[in-house]
Every structure is written in C-alpha cells, then in structure tokens.
Image (cartoon, grey):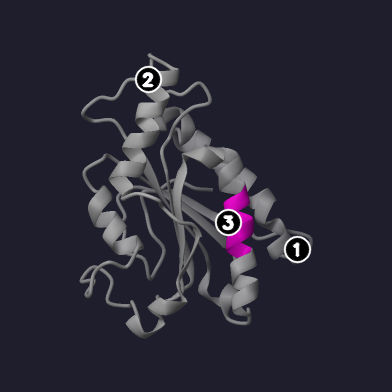
Amino acid sequence: MPHAILRFAKRKGGPATAIEQHHERKKQRYGSNPDIDHTRTKDNYHLIAPRLKYYGEIQTRIEQAKKQNPRCKVRKDSVKFIDTIVTASPEFFDAMSPQEIRRYFEHALEFLKREAGEGNIFSAVVHMDGRNPHMHLCFVPLTEDNRLSAKEVIGSRDKLVQWQDRFHDHMATFFPPSNGESPPPSLSENTSPPGCSNRPTASAGR
C-alpha cells in the first residue's frame, strides 16, 4: 500500500559542502548513488533555493540567533543542520503527472515550514533524476527562542513518533482511506529510502 516517507539525518557543519554538492547536483559522478540519471537532472527543481553556499546559510542563521539570544551556544559537537528527505513508496508516484508530484512536495513543504520554522529552512530541492522522486530539505534546528537544539526540535524516539503522527495527518489527503484506515507514513532518523545516498545509521518509527 502506498505510504508517505519523511526522514531526518542530524549533521554537524563539516558535511555541509559534500551534501550541497549532492543535493545541488554539482558533481559529474556520484559513486554513492549510481541510480542518478543525468539526462533527467534538468527536471530537478527548487521549492526553496539557497542564496549562499550551505555552510554560509547555516552560519548566517546561527549568528543571527546568537544576536537575538546570547544563550544560543554552539559546541564542537553541535548538530548544525538537519538533512531531511521527503518521498513516498515508489508505486505512489507511478500514475502521477509532474504537476501532481510537485503538489505533493509543496504540501509536504508546508508541513515542514510550520514544524521546523520557515526561516530556518535554507534549501528544498526536488530530485526527479533518481529511481524515485524525492525532496531534500535542509534546515537549522533553532528553537522559537533562538537556541540551537536538535534535541528539542527533532528529539528522541518518542518525539519522532509525534512528528510521524503530525506528518501523517498533514499528508492524509494524498492517501485515501482503504477499508476505513489510512496507511501510515514512514518516518525515521538518519536513514534514507531507496534511490537516495544517505547511509542508514539508526531508525525510529511506528
């Protein structure tokens, strides 16, 4: 049964350049993901385009947060951004037009703007050149009072389940009930669906 997929990877500042090269398709070859079809890369598109390099986007937001809240502390091991993947099970997209696929990702983006803070998101790019359409979205995990805290924003397994419930409710319009029930989405931490290059390290879901 088709289902929505939302997954997170917590990142420190170091991987920002490598992740930018992948998400923004700045490399000629991608050894970690041989499924990329470069003839279709032209069909990729941004819903939110970064204005700076990823590291600059991250640092700009953190510096602004520090000015607004002196309690915003950054440690060497701090998680500076969240690398998010939004997609769905492959069969879900089979009968959809490009316009319908775009509406799916735009709807998911509205959820992430609300939950992560629109101003914290610095890139949202839809890849149509892999095995399965998917959106890479990156945001800085800043709290409402301008503290850098992936623990508060993303949280533990219990909080991931809460994310899952809210995402399920938000995306339910794309998944009509079957036998009185809607299929639940998949939500995991630090894992990637097929066709994406993030390596799985841990997971949490229903």
Q: CA distance from mark 3 to mark 2?
A: 33 Å
Residue 88 vs 97, above or below: the answer is above
Disc ID at residue 83: none
Discs 3/2, front: 2
What secondary structure is the magenta-colored segment mainly?
Answer: helix
Amino acid type for the residue under numbered disc 3: Pro
Please tell me which of labels 3 and 1 falls first in the chain. Answer: 1
Res. 102 visible in picture: yes
* Residue farthest to the top, as pictured: 70
Give the x, y percent position of residue 135. 47, 61
Labelled pair 2, 1 in contact (Cβ < 8 Å): no
Residue sitting at x 29%, y 25%? 74
Query: Mark 3: which secondary structure?
Result: loop
Res. 184 visible in picture: no
156 or 146, which lies in front?
146
Start and end of the magenta stretch? 104-110
Residue linked to disc 1: 177
Residue 70 vs 186, above or below: the answer is above
* Residue farthest to the bottom, as pictured: 39
Q: Is residue 128 left or right of residue 163?
A: left
Residue linked to disc 3: 185
The N terminus sits in image quarter: bottom right
Residue sitting at x 46%, y 24%? 146
